[in-house]
Amino acid sequence: MTDFAGLELAKPLLRAITDDGYSTPTPIQAKAIPPLLDGRDLLGVAQTGTGKTAAFALPLLHRLSVNHAKARSRKPRALIVAPTRELAGQIGDSLRSYGRHVPLRIAVVFGGASIRPQITALLRGVHVVVATPGRLLDLMSQGHLRLDEVETFILDEADRMLDMGFIPDVKRIAAALPDRRQTMLFSATMPKTIQGLAASLLNDPVHIEVAPAATTVEKVTQRVLFVEKAKKRDLLGELMNDKDISRVLIFTRTKHGADRVARQLHQIGVNSDAIHGNKSQNARQRALKSFRSGRIRALVATDIAARGIDVDGVTHVINFELPNEPESYVHRIGRTARAGASGIAISFCDREERAYLRDIEKIIRQSVPVITDHPFHAAEIANDTGPAQKPQRNKRFGQGKGHGNGQARRNGQGRGNGQGHGNGQGHGEGRDHGEGRVQNDGNAPTQRRRAPKRHRRMENRAA
Ligand SMILES: Nc1ncnc2c1ncn2[C@@H]1O[C@H](COP(=O)(O)OP(=O)(O)OP(=O)(O)O)[C@@H](O)[C@H]1O
Ligand SMILES: [Mg+2]
């Protein structure tokens, strides 16, 4: 498969993606689009930044356009569910962009934004709904949305949607869908523990793995720096002297940690903002917008921004703290080196985080090279071969209900017990990544948050 024309997509779609500078389908697109056009169910695994969105969006838009019908009030023909509001918004923008020559109505619904305009949009008639689960269920229970005419159901970041934090909601959503439908699940990671659940949603699916799950993109240069916890702040300050770090996403494990790091960056004169689940939706959108536009150099984030978010030209990802879920590492560092670009990921690892690093290296099937020739390098941590204890959850971090008591998660049985993600309520952001039921007024959900991409090139991605 060398070009999009061979994929037999509807002309208006080809015109849009050609104008956007897409010349060659990425491997996941080349492999997934044909069976999806045939109506098959599909489980698709491919690295971060390799075009999974278009892999599900194009066949969906194709089917809706060739088999066109008037948009029906409250009854979409397709439903896409994603774990965060920002990702739902971005998927909506991509659909509108790829589908800009096709007369389709797309509604994006998520929490934290006023529900009124969402209700109005649904009432006026929709072909596709993109949603986060909490708001979707609210709209369903209030009678503003019915799923019984959904022909296509898509879970983006499917492994996240099927883990503890979201599965009760996803089960309720799936129960409202017709049995006869097409289902697509996509992610860059797919832990074995959730594969049974995934299978329960799919009917005779095609499995496509472009590379084994959790394979990191080759173009991310990964490094780890062993450092004393108390010195991380100074280390970050020191790194920020490097002007090559022009657009950097910095991850912390907690919301308070994100605020603290953003404050510290401000103090040393680095333009930055923080994004996490305790912020209002307006503040979240503002922070992401400033980061996209380059108004701020650093965005400090919890894992709320780890998955799916596509920002042009992120030069660096810094893990100020390592994630306690190894899959998160894959998604976090995948915010750089997208669409064939390159990028650098630097992880700070203190003594307590060595166990996290070990888990990460296990799932990515490689060891992360260590930076040893740095003044902050702590050789005694690097060389410590004793049993690495996972960090104790710490009240200061406000994570009482988080991932439980340190060892609980991924010790021997952790991944094999069918439950996967420990005994807590969620993943640092709770069940909803800030998709909570408390509704403060947000921007209209259908507002464009992202200009369509033009002239992007996917280099070195031949199938
Ligand atoms: N065929 C293509 N040619 C050129 N650019 C492409 C192509 N397909 C997608 N892109 C661009 O690649 C970038 C990454 O795409 P996308 O966000 O869909 O990746 P993803 O696989 O979903 O990543 P993640 O796992 O992080 O969600 C986007 O900016 C998109 O515009
Ligand atoms: Mg994606």
Image (cartoon, rainbow, N blue to C red):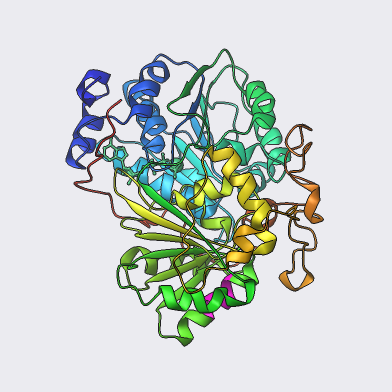
Task: Name the foreground residue: 225 vs 356.
Answer: 225
**Residue at the (44%, 33%) spot, across then down:** 46
Relative image position of residue 436 (x, y in whole percent):
66, 57
The answer to whether 463 is drawn above or below residue 244 in the figure is above
Task: Name the foreground residue: 58 vs 295.
Answer: 295
The reply to whether residue 158 is visible in this rendering is: yes
For residue 60, side relative to residue 436 (left or right): left
**Residue at the (37%, 40%) spot, across then down:** 95
Quadrant for the N terminus, please: top left
Quadrant for the C terminus, please: top left
The answer to whether 371 is drawn above or below residue 84 in the figure is below
The part of the chain drawn in magenta is 258-263
Residue 259 located within the stretch drawn in magenta = yes
**Residue at the (43%, 77%) spot, across then down:** 238
Residue 111 located within the stretch drawn in magenta = no
The reply to whether residue 120 is visible in this rendering is: no
**Residue at the (78%, 55%) spot, across then down:** 406
Task: Name the foreground residue: 377 vs 344.
Answer: 377
Relative image position of residue 53 (x, y in whole percent):
40, 38
The answer to whether 444 is drawn above or below residue 202 in the figure is below
For ligand 1, which image quadrant applies? top left
Relative image position of residue 34 (x, y in whole percent):
36, 17
Residue 191, image quadrant = top right
Magenta stretch, main secondary structure class: helix
